[in-house]
Image (tube, rainbow, N blue to C red):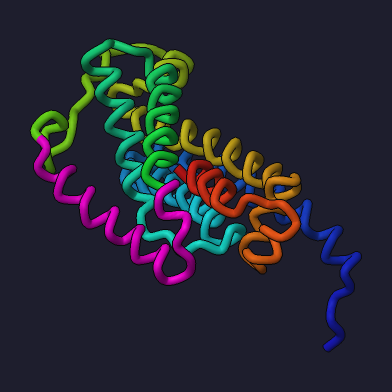
Amino acid sequence: MAASSPSSRGRLRPLLWAVAALVALLYPIPFERSGYIYYETVGFLVLLNAMLGIGWNIIGGWAGQFDFGPSIFFAIGAYTAALLSIHLGWNAWLALVGAIVVSVAICAAVTWPVTRLRGHYFAIATVAMWMIAQPIGATWQFINGSQGLFIPVAAGGSFVHGMLTMEFPGRGKGLGFYYLCLVLFVVTLLGARAVERSKLGFYFRAVRDDQDGAEAIGIDSRLYKVIARCLMA
């Protein structure tokens, strides 16, 4: 059987993306109408983990650093956003920005000392970070330990209001969070694509392929390891 030519594959790719986008947009509607909200939650979790995978690909794929601690910064961001909403009454989107700032700042602070390590030693250092952070998160009473935090949701409100406040009361909760996560996933995907094609992406791959060679031409490998991990966070 003859293999398809590169030109035919290139023409087919936009069609596949269009089909994938259509499926993603229509996926939760039948479940919403039939009351099977569980599958909307599954779709939300798939998109959430896809975003985490895109983040890990930056540090693990492009920069070539095996990192076993991305869940630390995911948790820091989630708890920061929740604390800002509960205790300071911040809007959810503003709390999201604050969570990003805090997560990136902590990531940069704890990553810089271990960027002198390479290969398995860097990976072991990230495992150690996770082993330290996990019991802290599970027992720290300020964040309610392993039970986590509960954010009260205002009753009523339209779907548009829910998108602006990240509050989806009642049956529309699953549908609302699915589409919210879908929007964030598209933004994450486009942002990662832009980084991949930029000079920054080139520096990441240079550090991955030959760290000594990258440093010989003036690329600060420690700095770009930190940047890659902060983008992941």
Image coordinates for residue 96, horizontal then vertical, percent: 41, 25
132 up-or-down from 194: above or below = below
Q: Residue furthest bottom?
A: 1
Viewer-closest of 5 and 147: 147
Q: In which quarter of the image is residue 108?
A: top left
Residue 180 painted magenta: no
175 up-or-down from 45: above or below = above
Looking at the rendering, the stretch of residues picked out in magenta corresponds to 112-140
123 up-or-down from 228: above or below = below
- Prevailing SS of the magenta stretch: helix
Image coordinates for residue 206, horizontal then vertical, percent: 69, 60
Q: Quadrant of residue 40?
A: top left
Image coordinates for residue 89, horizontal then vertical, percent: 28, 11
Residue located at (44% from left, 27% from top): 101
Q: Is residue 40 left or right of residue 84?
A: right
Viewer-closest of 200 and 48: 200
The quadrant of the picture occupied by the C terminus is top left
The number of discs equals 0
Residue located at (29% from left, 18% from top): 85
Q: Is residue 97 left or right of residue 127?
A: right
39 up-or-down from 13: above or below = above
Image coordinates for residue 68, horizontal then vertical, percent: 37, 60
The quadrant of the picture occupied by the N terminus is bottom right
Viewer-closest of 205 and 165: 205
Whether residue 36 is visible, yes or no, is no
Residue located at (69% from left, 46% from top): 200
Residue located at (35% from left, 58% from top): 126
Whether residue 88 is visible, yes or no, is yes
Residue 117 painted magenta: yes
Q: Quadrant of residue 36?
A: top left
Viewer-closest of 176 and 28: 176
